[in-house]
Amino acid sequence: MKNGLCFTLLLPAAILLAACGSPRSEGTSAPIMQNAAPANAYEHNDLIRVGDVLVIRLTGVPMEEQGAFELRADEGGQISMPYIGNIRAAGLTTVQLKDKIETLYKLKKIFSAPNITVMTQQTRYVSVTGEVRSPSRIPYSNDLTALSVIATCGGFSDYADRRHIRILRGNDVIEFNANEAMQDPSKDISILPDDRIQINRSVF
């Protein structure tokens, strides 16, 4: 009975010590995420920004109400559509803005079956620096992956470190192994607008 009691008392202490001894991650301004994003793991990112020019086409409504509107997201990130006024567009994707406008028209009982198409006039870019044959900035498209961007820039130089490629995405740094991705395409990484790919020289 005493042995059982001692075990009962010691077990919580052992669990507490184990928890205290576990390593903790310290936050950094640019966390490195290894193999963080296989191809298609990131949803296509076409977020609308302040100052972006949008072409919004309205169909599925009476002929006299149909049309295309060229609108710029103002300093508050808003645009204005007929009958529903100001709508916040900045921070939404083009698909989210389409759904938002269609929903507002229906909720306000202005149109019963509106069809909205949203296109951006801005060209977004992806930049590649370091050990590729033609470091450059290329126009973004939603089918780009790390390997396809590198191929567009002429491929790796003879001195490229293919195992430790860095993709800078906002405040994040994603570390990418191109050798593994070439063997297994599922390990390739989908590229987003404004990504910066850095390829350093191999130390070997």
Image (cartoon, grey):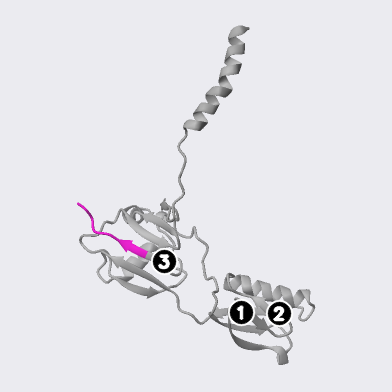
Residue at 41% from the left image edge and 64% from the top image edge: 145
Which residue bears the numbered disc 3?
Answer: 195
Image quadrant holding the N terminus, namely top right
Tell me: residue 175, above or below residue 96.
Answer: above
Residue at 34% across, 52% down: 180
Q: Residue at x 45, y 69 (%)?
A: 193
Label 1: few (<14), some or many (≥20) within 10 Å?
some
- Decide which of 117, 126 is in the foreground and name it: 126
Q: Quadrant of residue 152?
A: bottom left
At mark 3, the secondary structure is loop
Q: Mark 3 or mark 2: which is in front?
A: 3
Per the image, the residue denoted by label 1 is 117
> Image check: 51 left or right of 36?
right
- Residue 157, compared with residue 71, is above or below; it is above
Of the residues tagged 3 and 1, which is closer to the observer?
3
Closer to the N terminus: mark 3 or mark 2? 2
Q: Assess whether mark 1 and mark 3 are in contact (beta carbons under 8 angstroms).
A: no
Q: Is residue 159 magenta?
A: no
The amino acid type found where label 1 is placed reads Thr
Q: Which residue is mark 2?
A: 114
Identified by mark 2, the residue type is Pro
Q: Position of residue 106 (x, y in %)?
A: 76, 75
Instruction: Kindly identify the amino acid type of the residue bearing the numbered disc 3.
Output: Asp
Picture quadrant where residue 197 is located:
bottom left
What is the quadrant of residue 70 in the picture?
bottom right
- Majority SS type along the magenta span: loop
Q: Could you say which disc has been placed on residue 132 in the image? A: none
Evaluate if marks 1 and 2 touch, with contact meaning CB atoms under 8 Å apart.
no
Side of 113 relative to 77 (left or right): right
Q: Which residues are magenta?
A: 197-204
Does the magenta portion include 199?
A: yes
